[in-house]
Amino acid sequence: MAGAKDYANTHVSNNREQVEYHVREILKLIGENVEREGLLETPARVTRMYEEIFAGYAVDPRDVLGVTFDEQHEELVIVKDIVYYSQCEHHMAPFYGKAHIGYIPSGKIAGLSKLARLVEAVSRRLQVQERITSQIADILEEVLVPHGVMVVVEGEHLCMCARGVKKPGSKTVTSAVRGQFRQSSALRSEFLELLKR
């Protein structure tokens, strides 16, 4: 997925009028005047934004890996610093950060851009960071059947930074480890060391 315009959230698109109506009602309930100039187009803008930020519902994340290639490379492959944006399912507040993926092929590889597409497909829906991390690892394990997978995701959560405890700058780091990475501390260390470069 080069960007959100590659696929719209068809569910939101098909229900655009209803989504706009409910956004307008929420604005009224919080005490806003929906007839003032600055808010006239807000329900439509929010609906278009939802189509983009929830575009992950429109695809099966397994499909975004696309065509795989037979390749007898059985050494560590890493794609790091994949920027993602998601929405916390508890507060519908944004969280964002970077995902780092490492895997050891067992005869099948994916195009490198497909790993970034996978992160986007998984993150563009209501989520928690822990689930994003596990889903990426599980899908890679299912589709590529590698010797091992390790995923590290870091995120900054506005539900914690802008509200509640209000601790901006605090980061959450999650990891998922599968196959040989689970068995070998040396492999885990190699992956983490390469992330620092």
Image: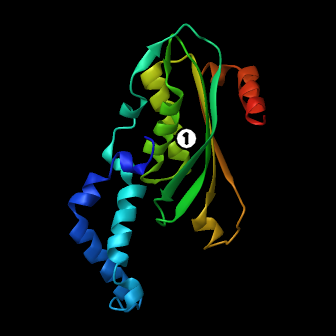
Residues 14 and 181: in front is: 14
Q: Quadrant of residue 13?
A: bottom left
Q: Which secondary structure, mark 1?
A: helix
Going by the numbered disc 1, the residue's amino acid type is Thr
> Which of 1 and 184 lies nearest the eye of the viewer?
1
**Colour mode?**
rainbow
The residue depicted at 31 percent of the width and 81 percent of the height is 24
Residue 143 spot, x, y in % from top left: 42, 23
**Residue 172: percent from the left, percent from the top?**
66, 52
Q: Residue at x 33, y 42 (%)?
A: 59
Residue receiving disc 1: 133
Residue 104 x/y as whole percent: 60, 18
- Report the label total: 1
Give above or below for 42 relative to 110: below
Q: Residue at x 45, y 15 (%)?
A: 69
* Residue 18 vertical position relative to residue 9 in the rendered view, above or below: below
**Looking at the image, residue 118 lies above or below residue 149:** below
Q: Residues within 10 Å of mark 1 (few under 14, many from 20)?
A: many
| Residue 45 % position (x, y) | 37, 71
